[in-house]
């Protein structure tokens, strides 16, 4: 189980939500930002919501580069428009590490619309940009609101894609430290497009039904 | 609620499964095939599995054209390679009708692989080919084995896409006549690609985990 989790581009709701949950599970979390001061202020905010919770890990802020260098595992939660450039700047820091891409290629224009990615998906783009990292796709489908609602379990499956089986096991174990979450091996990297696409669908369902939804795969062996 | 359901290209497992469930729900079902005799023999087989079940509707076989002409609603379950040509031949028969596309653009080559569709999805291809029909996407994610296991409810959500709200309601009501099924409005036609892609993902999960899975959207209002 990794000790320190870096959240790259972690100041948005999804990054904060994952940071909160990983800290709640006793991990040390470093929230990375383009702006180290912004990372620090968001980290302080997240840490304050965890005050008094037994066993919670420290939450710190840093630049994306410093966070990437510090983390045993890095989770990428930048908006899609910054995805490629952010990772291109971190090739060295992330070499050899498990990198979890949680980014959904989506833009908003009267509802969520998918953005075409040359590599097929954001996760495959990350794998192309970071050839020396162990890239896995995960966490796309967890609604930030649910992650931030710390007293409620997140009743959701996390669909994990990738070609590095050990990296997938590490990420799956980390995901299952979030109360209520089950990790499901969803296949190789090339299936990431479906997980990312499903997220666009869920965002649409959420807007349509004015709620926040998650997905469960029924019928898996216990 | 439509009285007669045509299943276009309905002799495969998915077509048989849907035919069985609709008949079980008291609908008259016409199983269409390129070969009317084949449609008739599969229909007789499906009818025999329903023998003695109170309230079951008749199951008949026909050519695809005769089935399409007879049905109040047509459900399309041809393999993707026959999708466009099959529908092109039925433009007249299907004009003005609710047409439900359940086809997944997939081919099998060391696991399921998506097939690119110029229109974005099989359902959008159907809408392009059938401009005078009321095209809806649905039923993609119901495993044929589960549909054919008549004594067990199908614990699954059917994701319904389309632009014709009344057609979606008709199809949703029909879907919910299958025991255990809940219909979820998954948005406009352009979201069909995500529903179809999700099916490719589930097929992969099924192969990987040697099981049959369905999807549930958690968090919708009851």
Image (cartoon, coloured by chain):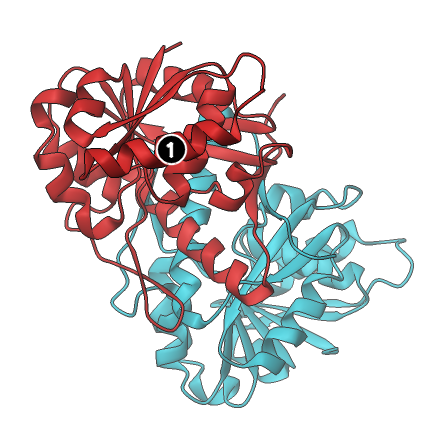
Chain colours: A red, B cyan
Q: Nearer the viewer, residue B27 or B185?
A: B185
Locate the C terminus of chain B and report the quarter of the image it occupies.
Answer: bottom right
- The answer to which quarter of the image holds residue A92 is top left
Left or right position of B27 against A55: right
Q: Nearer the viewer, residue A12 or B48?
A: A12
Q: Is residue A184 visible?
A: no
Q: Is residue B88 visible?
A: yes
Name the residue rendered at 35%, 79% in the picture. B128
Q: Position of residue B96 (x, y in %)?
A: 54, 90
- The answer to which quarter of the image holds residue A100 is top left
Locate the N terminus of chain B and report the quarter of the image it occupies.
Answer: bottom right
Left or right position of B9 against A32: right
Q: Position of residue A78 (x, y in %)?
A: 26, 43
The chain under label 1 reads A
Name the residue rendered at 37%, 37% in the picture. A15
The residue wearing badge 1 is A138
* Mark 1: secondary structure: loop
């Amino acid at each position: 189980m990794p000790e320190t989790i870096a959240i790259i581009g972690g100041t948005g709701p999804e990054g904060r939500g994952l940071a909160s949950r990983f800290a709640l599970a006793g991990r040390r979390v470093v929230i990375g930002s383009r702006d180290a001061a912004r990372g620090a202020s968001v980290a302080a905010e997240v840490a304050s919501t965890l005050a008094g919770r037994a066993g919670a890990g420290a939450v710190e802020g840093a630049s994306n580069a410093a966070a990437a260098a510090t983390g045993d595992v890095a989770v990428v939660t930048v908006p899609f428009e910054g995805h490629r450039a952010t990772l291109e700047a971190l090739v060295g820091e992330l070499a050899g590490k498990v990198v979890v891409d949680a980014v959904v290629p989506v833009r908003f224009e009267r509802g969520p619309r998918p953005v075409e990615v040359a590599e097929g998906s954001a996760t495959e783009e990350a794998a192309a940009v970071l050839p020396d990292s162990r890239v896995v796709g995960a966490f796309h489908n967890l609604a930030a609101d649910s992650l931030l609602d710390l007293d409620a379990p997140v009743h959701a499956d996390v669909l994990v894609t990738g070609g590095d089986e050990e990296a997938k096991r590490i990420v799956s174990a980390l995901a299952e430290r979030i109360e209520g979450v089950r990790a499901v091996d969803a296949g190789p990297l090339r299936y990431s497009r479906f997980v990312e696409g499903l997220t666009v669908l869920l965002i649409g369902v959420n807007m349509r039904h004015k709620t926040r939804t998650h997905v469960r795969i029924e019928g898996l062996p216990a």
